[in-house]
Amino acid sequence: MRSWNGWGDEGDTTSLGGGGRKLLESSLGPGRPPREATLAEVVGAVPPSRLEPVEELHVTTDAEMRVRRARGQSLPDLAALRYGRLEAVPDAVARPVETSDVRALIDHARSVGARLIPYGGGTSVVGGVSARPGPDPLITVDLGGLVGVRNVDGQSGLVSVLAGTTGPALATLLAGHGLVIGHEPQSWELATVGGWVAARGSGLKSLGAGRIEQLFAGGTLEAPAGTLAMQPYPASAAGPDLRQLVLGSEGRLGILTEATLRASPNPEVEGMAAWALPAWPAAVDAVRQLVQTRPGLSLLRLSTLAETRTLLAFAEKPAQTRALGAYIRARRLPADWVLVLCGVAGRRRTAKAAADEAKAVLGGHGGIRLPALAAAWSKTRFRSPYLRNALWSAGYASDTLETATDWAHVPGLLARIEAALGSALAPWGETVHVFTHLSHLYPSGSSLYITYIFRLAPDPDETMARWRALKAAASQTIRADGATISHHHGVGVDHAPYLADEKGPLGMAALRAVVRTFDPDGMMNPGVLLADDPG
Ligand SMILES: Cc1cc2nc3c(=O)[nH]c(=O)nc-3n(C[C@H](O)[C@H](O)[C@H](O)COP(=O)(O)OP(=O)(O)OC[C@H]3O[C@@H](n4cnc5c(N)ncnc54)[C@H](O)[C@@H]3O)c2cc1C
């Protein structure tokens, strides 16, 4: 059963481990495990619904269901659930099972004056699916009933998928066709195709498969104003591409019921290499050079020294970590070595050429390969989200943020965000454990993916005040540097106050006009994407 107040499966027993706890205790001080609300307590406090259930539309007002769909996976979401302080829950949850149910549901919502929150996997980390208090009743539309592949066009590599299909379900459905999509966010086990598109995400292997905007070829959007059918043209010069409006629309324009995705043949080979590079500046230079040769890698990521050390501290097998340290010393790498991960996937010949190019560039910068680390990382890469649950129970909050900028700004921006986060809790006399990797690399720049861990305060309000200080410090630094407020998590509620600064007045007016056209009465996901929009 899915956890109601954290990541993943309820029965998961991921623990912090000795190394991770020691690291946090020495950098932040001992954690103070909070009192956690029980599901029964939270369900017991749910206010009466302002709506009636509608069986034929699969609309329920069941209190537990409303709690389970009230929030996503942002830090404020997690805190609200764990502390049992939900400021709002939806009045009802709808779970359409046919695409035609979605149109009927929009009509029903209009007739009862309700707002709709599209909910795919509920993995938004920016408040994109969080119920908020308001005068109008809220219906959260759980798209988890719209699962399946409608059509596979093997000749063109086009796959039409229902929007509520998750990554693992899609991989299973496509296995018999010899096709893969290649979009593998770390939230893979729960996130859905509709959410990938609506939040405009990037998977781990974005260097090979591309971001979702390169994979999304078309589909159907049910909007309050009508239906938008998007043809899967390989390219089109028929004016601005409306598919680009739907990408990143975060439920504000309507509900995507079906998406056509560009698939690739199953890779003949798929591999991952881990490299240790002597020091950060040389490593940045190496990965930039490498990505600019466009070698056909599927994945490239570079961890800072702090992240390299944190990953090793949290590794589950201390004996392996010690052996790795000895190996690195024997190969005479300095103590401040940093980790580079590098993946290949595809035809044997092209994958080999890409791996050879990586070897030439990374080896040429003094790097050495770490085969054992590559295997361990591949095995556990979808496990790290579970650590968030364990951290919270141990008295620590962990959150991430991300941005992107050009190469000239990468080092300065990274240093400034880390410094802003590092000092944001000084008023409370608290320190912050911050670490970063370059997660998605491009010839012209890179995304920066930053994790920050801080101690929970004895008082829930103070924990949230600490988080707000951290989020504001990082977001203001990102915008002051002219970087984007999000590379792949989206805007949601948490980044909405910073969007106008990035898009400018004309850009915001255009966005508002588009939203009004698709949704004249402001029924769809109010408060998300456009902060100052009354909805
Ligand atoms: C542990 C963790 C790891 C993550 N790793 C990554 C990562 O590697 N890469 C990445 O890009 N993101 C990542 N994310 C963020 C998140 O998983 C992605 O944004 C994902 O694409 C959201 O998919 P979802 O189905 O869960 O959407 P939801 O969270 O349900 O919704 C996200 C937004 O899209 C809207 N929406 C959802 N479905 C539809 C639909 N069918 N029609 C219209 N609007 C819709 C919602 O209203 C909301 O605004 C991560 C999140 C977590 C918690």
Image (cartoon, rainbow, N blue to C red):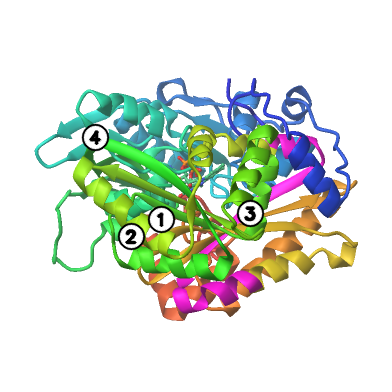
Mark 2 and mark 4 lie on one chain; the one further toward the N terminus is 2
3 and 1 marks in contact (CB < 8 Å): no
Residue 87, by quadrant, is: top right
Look at mark 2 in the image and give the residue it sits on. 245
> Label 1, label 4: how many angstroms apart (C-alpha)?
30 Å
Nearer to us: label 2 or label 4: 4
> Label 2, label 4: how many angstroms apart (C-alpha)?
30 Å
Where 173 sits versus 258, above or below?
above
The local secondary structure at tag 3 comes to helix
Look at mark 3 in the image and give the residue it sits on. 307
Is 122 or 356 nearer to us in this picture?
356
Residue range (magenta)? 389-415
Q: Which mark is residue 266?
A: 4
Tell me the crowding category of disc 2: few under 14, some 14 to 19, or many 20 or more residues within 10 angstroms, Cα based.
some
Callout 2, which amino acid? Leu
The local secondary structure at tag 4 comes to loop
